[in-house]
Image (cartoon, rainbow, N blue to C red):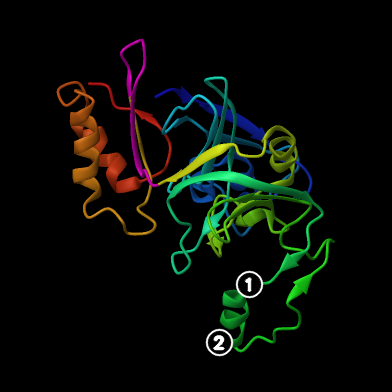
Amino acid sequence: MPVFGGQAVYKVVKGDTIEGIGAQLGVNWTRIVKDNHIDIKKILRIGQELRVNTRRIVPKSINNGIIINIPDRMLYFFKDGRLDMAFPVGLGKSSWMTPEGPFIITFKQKNPTWHVPVSIQQEMEMKGKPVKTIVVLPGPDNPLGRYVVKTSIRNIEIHETIWPTSVYQFRSHGCIRVLPQNIEKFYEEVKMNTPGELIYMPVKVARLESGRIFLEVHKDIYSKIPDLRDETNRHIEKAGLAGKVDWQKVETMLKEKTGIAEDVTL
């Protein structure tokens, strides 16, 4: 599995927040705070430079189509056997999980109307919130944004979000939220009947041609893995790398679960 990204410097621009920067780059904002010794009580300075690590392992390579790794909170788009795009997404909260499984793209629409699902109306009522409308017309208040790409999985859509900081988080009702700058290109390039798959892989291992071994560990956000340590050991042993990794580094990564691919070569 290929590895991409790495150490980079991000320069703060007007309107930036730590959470928003994390959403753009696909990095946990708490990691940005820790690595840059940021006082979260203070406002970021325009021009301030932040050290970030965006290195990650592609979870699964295919010839053409979409792979969305749920723990990874990333969408990978392949064309002609190569990775054409990869960007952060927002996914379902623990009480409203984004499902796993294969799908195809069934519909695309610009400036969609949102028909509020009955399940969301019921949730609002249970929380004591007034259900003001069941149809939201196109516009700045429409949660689907300007672009929606529907999948064959019931009620699961890939769409622009009007809440940018919810990207690279688990806050949706199962749908896949995308930042404006990413959905525009994706919408134009993805075709009807494009195949895809939602997978659940919190642990990824890759060996480069150079022989270096990388490990990436995410939180088991939906509590689907009985033992993350056993899962990690299984991936390493399956790849035939048990005698070639630094197990102390592996243990540290299991504790931190940063979601960043790190070199664990012995």
Location of mark 1 (residue): 117
Q: Start and end of the magenta stretch?
A: 200-213
Task: Out of 160 and 243, give the one closest to the viewer.
Answer: 160
Q: In which quarter of the image is residue 261?
A: top left
Location of mark 2 (residue): 126
- Measured as percent of width and height from the top left, residue 117 is found at 63, 72
For residue 97, side relative to residue 186 (left or right):
left
- Measured as percent of width and height from the top left, residue 221 is found at 39, 56
Give the numbered dot on residue 196. none
Magenta segment includes 210: yes
Residue with the most extreme bottom position: 128
Name the amino acid, label 1. Pro
Mark 1 packing: few (<14 Cα in 10 Å), some, or many (20+)? few
- Measured as percent of width and height from the top left, residue 266 is found at 22, 21
Closer mark to the observer between disc 1 and disc 2: 1
Measure how far apart labels 1 and 2 are at the Cα level: 14 Å
What kind of element bears circle 2?
Answer: helix
Q: In this view, does 55 lie above or below 162?
A: above
